[in-house]
């Protein structure tokens, strides 16, 4: 005679209110899959690869380029003309759209990477040097925004930090008469210090008063802009001698970065090398140093970091000092380039806000931000060649915006390309089904 232990059946029943997940194997329930349904090693590798951030980023760029191609076709005059008799000869519209898209992206590549139509190799690779030149300040400012992101701070004050850095360099370094080996690094350091102080002010105010960094950085952007504009309009401060325009004196020749590859490539100077070094330093600080561990801990959970003995307020100040200094480096790439003839109140050239996009695309990682900066520098360089073909330059801005949009919405991207869902998405969907079933029960 068999005996039944009281409560044994109850132990196998889910308790009242417990989530009723579907009875399938896998990571949701912990139940093993049948032997014939267990994924192979290659299947697991492919699934994890498709879920990875690198594939997601690449597909976001591809999808943005596809949408950009549609816009190029719609704005092309030949396509618009042939669309008028589409039902009579649809092939003409298709061919015109294809030629418009291929011609537009060929011009983008020719203006950003390699110009096969040029006569010599140096001229053919000049577009790449232009792209790298445009990318240098984007990378530097993006690193500052990314580092703040990793600390849990939304720094949108890179513009103000760049303007203050330019102001510091103009006030304290432009009027010096020094040899290049001393004048160039001194100007660079002064600009970085100016940006760091302006960024550190945000961190200090947040640490001492609890004010939100978004409000602080927005307001300080305005303060920096109008302060610099006043100095550029005031004789004896930053305004060039003998001029009534809000323009500074030219950057002294001894404070300019030398050409990296010679006079045939004036767009690329040693400032790019400084940015590469800054990328290595930021990567090491954030990923390998004890300070980086504290920065990341505060970014993940400030309360837990404080409970572990980390001074959250001090970390906020450190993070914004670093972020402001990197924005200052971006400004120095602008005013110490070999083609500068002085700067105005728009010296940031939108880089301060583009840096947010670069940091988001780079997923707030040093080398990801570096790659994103090069991509956006190439898009900017190639946009001029596209514009020469009659394509609106705003399409490039649309492509940039769409890239970030798709990066920020991975479920949408996975749905478009039929990528496997992550375990978190599967679990969330299973919980939603269980809750819906419980409501209707």
Image: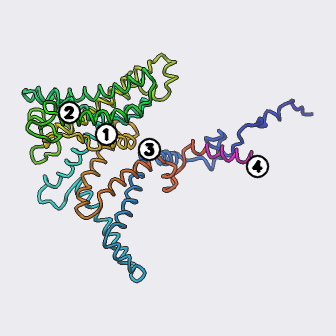
What SS does tag 4 mark?
Answer: helix
Residue 73 left/right relative to 28:
left
Q: CA distance from mark 2 to mark 1?
A: 20 Å
Residue to which mark 3 is pinned: 53
CB under 8 Å between discs 4 and 3? no
Q: Earlier in the sequence, mark 4 or mark 3?
A: 3
Residue to which mark 1 is pinned: 352
Give the number of the disc on residue 231.
2
Residue to which mark 4 is pinned: 440
Q: Earlier in the sequence, mark 2 or mark 3?
A: 3
Across and down, in percent, residue 145 comes to 36, 35
Q: Classify 10 Å Cα crowding around label 1: few (below 14), some (14-19), many (20 and above).
A: many
CB under 8 Å between discs 1 and 4? no
Where 177 falls versus 260 (above or below)? Answer: above
Tell me the magenta residue range.
428-440
Q: Earlier in the sequence, mark 4 or mark 2?
A: 2
- Splitting the image into 4 quarters, where does residue 91 fall? bottom left
Across and down, in percent, residue 297 comes to 46, 25
Residue 439 is one of the magenta-drawn residues: yes
Q: CA distance from mark 4 to mark 3?
A: 38 Å
């Amino acid at each position: 005679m068999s005996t039944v232990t009281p409560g044994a059946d109850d132990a196998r029943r889910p308790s009242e209110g417990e989530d009723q997940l579907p009875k399938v194997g896998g990571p949701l329930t912990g139940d093993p899959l049948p032997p014939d349904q267990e994924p192979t090693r290659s299947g697991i590798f492919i699934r994890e690869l498709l879920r990875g951030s690198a594939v997601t980023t690449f597909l976001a760029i591809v999808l943005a380029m596809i949408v950009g191609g549609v816009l190029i076709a719609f704005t092309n005059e030949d396509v618009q003309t042939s669309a008028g008799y589409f039902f009579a000869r649809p092939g003409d519209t298709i061919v015109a759209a294809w030629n418009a898209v291929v011609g537009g992206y060929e011009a983008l590549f020719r203006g950003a990477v390699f110009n096969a139509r040029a006569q010599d190799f140096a001229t053919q690779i000049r577009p790449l040097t232009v792209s790298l030149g445009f990318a240098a300040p984007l990378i530097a400012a993006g690193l500052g925004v990314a580092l703040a992101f990793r600390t849990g701070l939304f720094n949108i004050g890179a513009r103000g930090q760049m303007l203050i850095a330019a102001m510091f360099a103009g006030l304290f370094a432009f009027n010096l008469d020094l040899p290049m080996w001393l004048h160039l690094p001194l100007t660079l350091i002064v600009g970085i210090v100016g940006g760091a102080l302006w960024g550190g002010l945000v961190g200090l105010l947040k640490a001492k008063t609890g004010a939100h960094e978004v409000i602080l950085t927005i307001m300080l952007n305005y303060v920096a802009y109008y302060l610099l504009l006043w100095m550029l309009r005031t004789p004896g401060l930053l305004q060039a001698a003998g001029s009534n325009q809000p323009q500074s004196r030219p950057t002294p020749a001894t404070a300019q970065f030398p050409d990296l590859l010679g006079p045939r490539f004036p767009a690329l100077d040693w400032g790019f090398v400084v940015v590469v070094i800054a990328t290595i330093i930021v990567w090491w600080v954030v990923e390998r140093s004890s300070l980086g561990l504290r920065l990341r801990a505060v970014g993940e959970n400030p309360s837990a970091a404080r409970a572990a003995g980390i001074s959250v307020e001090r970390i906020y100040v450190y993070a914004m000092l670093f972020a402001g200094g990197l924005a200052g480096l971006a400004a120095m790439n602008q005013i110490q380039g070999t083609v500068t003839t002085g700067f105005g109140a728009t010296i940031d050239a939108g880089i301060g806000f583009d840096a947010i996009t670069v940091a988001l695309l780079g997923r707030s990682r040093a080398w990801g931000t570096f790659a994103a900066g090069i991509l956006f520098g190439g898009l900017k360089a190639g946009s001029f060649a596209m514009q020469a073909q009659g394509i609106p330059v705003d399409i490039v801005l649309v492509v940039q915006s769409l890239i970030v949009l798709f990066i920020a919405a991975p479920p949408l991207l996975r749905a478009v390309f039929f990528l496997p869902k992550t375990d978190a998405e599967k679990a969330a969907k299973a919980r939603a089904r269980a809750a819906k079933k419980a409501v209707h029960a």
